[in-house]
Image: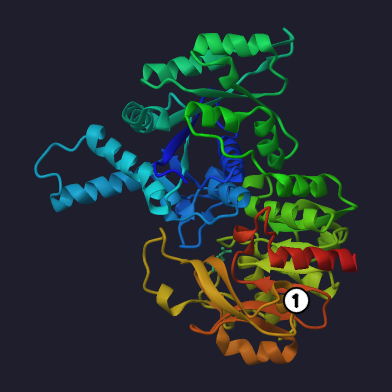
Amino acid sequence: MSAKTKFIFVTGGVTSSLGKGIISASLAKLLQARGFKVGIQKFDPYINIDPGTLNPYEHGECFVTEDGAETDLDLGHYERFLNEPTSQANNVTTGRIYQTVIDKERRGDYLGSTVQVIPHITDEIKYRIKLIGKKHNYDFVITEIGGTVGDIESLPYIESVRQLKWEMGSDCLVVHLTLVPYLAAAGELKTKPTQHSVKMLLEQGVQPDIIVCRTEHHLNDNIRDKIARFCNVLPSSVVESIDAKSIYDVPILMRNEMLDSEVLKLTQTPVTKEANIEEWEEFLFKLKNPIETIQIALVGKYVELQDAYKSILESFVHAGAQNQAKIVVNMVHSEQINDQNVADMLGKYKGILVAPGFGERGIEGKIVAVRFARENKIPFLGICLGMQCAVIEFARNVLNLKDAHSTEFRPNTPFPVIDIMENQKKISGLGGTMRLGAYPCEILKDTLAYDAYGKEQITERHRHRYEFNNDYLSRFTEAGMVPTGINTKDDLIEIVEVKDHPYFVGVQFHPEYKSTVATPHPVFMSFVRAIKKYQ
Ligand code: GLN
């Protein structure tokens, strides 16, 4: 559309976890629904080069893009909302910024000048902010700044935003998300934290243009006027973001609050058409009017932490809505499952999913869960490590290879049915060195996989070092665990299925990274259909 890209920044104040990612994705969705080309990216102020090496307890799931970048889980929201892939360029950390600047300094690119936060670090940040807009010719680029205003580590980002606002005028806009807490004792909503947080931004030279207020209760006109007056914005630029039942309600709530119109007005963008969100509303209708409720188990080791399995949980929301079923995903701790209690722990569920993961903790419980699903003919889906556990279980209990294991956990196992890939053996560093991103896979006909995808050539995203060991392939196939998806170029088994079972599928890749509201993932769709059929 327009030749010039407009830049919208989303900052956060008062506290973390207010949902900047969802607000950013919702605004992007509304602008996209008006026919604009929108890109969305996240800048994280921590020093890690990327979240690939982070423990899920720190930042939740690591989201993997088509081009194999290990990124922040907010990129998953961006893809699920916009139905468009993101890439390495959409997630930048302080670590990456500094690494680039230091590399340039070592090469001598700065010609002897003193390398400083301003201008060298801020110039690198500004360059990266503009990058995706140029590449894709976006009308709008929404940039979420991680962290909370006032953090020492976010200073260079806020300074970069200040400079860009100065340089670009109305082509650059700051949306500041704050909290308006409700004091039950006083029976009142309080605006002071918002005022303070805006003051903090002002101290750093940035006047926010729109203030989005996260709140448990509706904001009345008084509150809106008060925030507008103290924070130098128009009353129409004070936007309520009330707690929602589902994150997928937020685009609708933001449209009702006219956040997108306000953005168009303030960036002086001509309004060409209203947002067409019919499909989104249809999805919401299905989501809210399920015909049945189905309980399934997710066997993993991060049960206290929903964020660790974010994309899997969202994939069930998408596939459930499409199938008019509310899928309740119960977290079951793999460390607590054993042969004696497995029937008690898993017997009540209509489907069992064994989660991806790294490290030995909880492995034996996962293997017991697989066995229970296989022997009791409960629909089963194993993802990545979950698939590897299915292979180990089959080796031990069907092929009678008693100590079969993955060499990730038993380097000296006599039966290494899951083994490290040849090209992984010489790798020493941990960051960004796995088999990452999209790889092609050929689907064999007359299989559950083919039922799901309905085609022979697919691509799926990966994040692992270990693989099915082909030395054992004929034994598995003869005994009834067959490969149904293969990477023919490198001869890697990507999908296994157990015959003589209503639905037993293990996938070496991560289907959850590709499920969106507009296109629920075929594997989750087929798993949900199977659960409905066999329950
Ligand atoms: N730890 C396993 C591997 O590296 C599985 C990884 C995963 O589940 N993402 O191969």
Q: Is residue 385 left or right of residue 158?
A: right
Of residues 202 and 283, which is closer to you in this image?
Answer: 283
Give the image location of residue 212, x and y in percent: 58, 25
Of residues 139 and 433, which is closer to you in this image?
Answer: 139
Residue at 45% from the left image edge and 49% from the top image edge: 90
Give the image location of residue 446, x and y in percent: 75, 85
* Crowdedness near tag 1: few (<14), some (14–19) or many (≥20) residues, C-alpha within 10 Å: some
Vertical side of 410 occupied by 442: above or below: below
Vertical side of 151 occupied by 518: above or below: below
Residue at 60% from the left image edge and 59% from the top image edge: 513
So how many labels did they put on this image?
Answer: 1
Place residue 236 in its image quadrant.
top right
Of residues 107 and 465, which is closer to you in this image?
Answer: 107
Mark 1, residue position: 451
Q: Is residue 247 left or right of residue 134?
A: right
**Quarter for ligand 1?**
bottom right
Place residue 457 in its image quadrant.
bottom right
Locate the C terminus and report the quarter of the image it occupies.
bottom right
Residue at 56% from the left image edge and 61% from the top image edge: 358
> Helix or strand or loop: what does disc 1 sit on?
helix
| Amino acid on which the number 1 mark rests in the picture | Asp
Give the image location of residue 401, x and y in percent: 67, 84
Vertical side of 386 occupied by 499: above or below: below
